[in-house]
Amino acid sequence: MEKELKLVPILTTEQIQEKVTELAQKITEEYQDYFPLMVGILKGCFIFAADLLRQLEFPYEVDFLGTSSYGDSTTSSGVVKLTKDLDFNVENRHVLLIEDIVDTGLTLHYLCDILKRREPLSVNIVALVEKDIPRTVDLPVKYIGFKVPNVYVAGYGLDWKEQFRGLPYIAQVIE
Ligand code: IMP
């Protein structure tokens, strides 16, 4: 029998839009003279990145990295796989990674490690959501939108088993 699923909204469309504008202003202040490479982490970043990048009022380039660790499960496997590498060379560039959500932090830790070996001028992270849990890894998270409790969330690009990415708000998924 199909299990019943409940979506409980925790961040509204308005709250998210306000936060994205605030983040864009902070990033503009610090990066406007850097011609940075803005790197979206697929797939969950696609809506956040699109909204954020359209509010940046300075020149930048865009690239994407693809990773997978969860597959169809809702807990981290701890093993991160690079499914798409960058098209750009990051040597001597300022790089800002755009992430939807930081959970264990293992994905970003792995990606930062790879990128730092390519000798960029800097690597930092903007994450829309961070789960409020203790982390075992150190991360250069420079900008955070929201902290949420340790629950599974979906919407605004985030999926639950590949569903709900198009929800205009973020909801807790209760199975
Ligand atoms: P981490 O490596 O544990 O930090 O997980 C990072 C990735 O797992 C994110 O980029 C998301 O794609 C996915 N993820 C982690 N928590 C959630 C969640 O609550 N909802 C949807 N995706 C999540």
Image (tube, grey):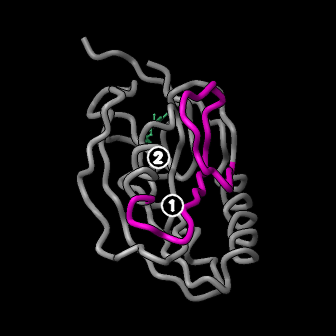
Residue 90 is situated, as x and y percent measured from the top left of the image, at 41, 73
Q: For residue 97, which numbered disc appears in the image?
A: 1
Q: Bounds of the magenta span?
A: 116-145
Residue 28 is situated, as x and y percent measured from the top left of the image, at 70, 77
Splitting the image into four quadrants, where does ligand 1 fall?
A: top left
SS of the residue at dot 1? Answer: strand
Q: Residues within 10 Å of mark 2 (few under 14, many from 20)?
A: many
Q: Is residue 126 above or below residue 95?
A: above
Q: Residue at 58%, 59% (x, y): give it.
A: 124
Q: State the residue in front, 65 or 171.
A: 65
Q: Residue at 24%, 11% (x, y): give it.
A: 1
Whether label 2 touches label 1, CB < 8 Å? yes
Residue 106: quarter of image: top left
Q: Is residue 104 above or below residue 30?
A: above
Residue 116 is situated, as x and y percent measured from the top left of the image, at 45, 59
Per the image, the residue denoted by label 2 is 108
Q: Which one is earlier in the sequence, the residue at label 2 or at label 1? A: 1
Q: Residues within 10 Å of mark 1 (few under 14, many from 20)?
A: many
Residue 102 is situated, as x and y percent measured from the top left of the image, at 54, 41
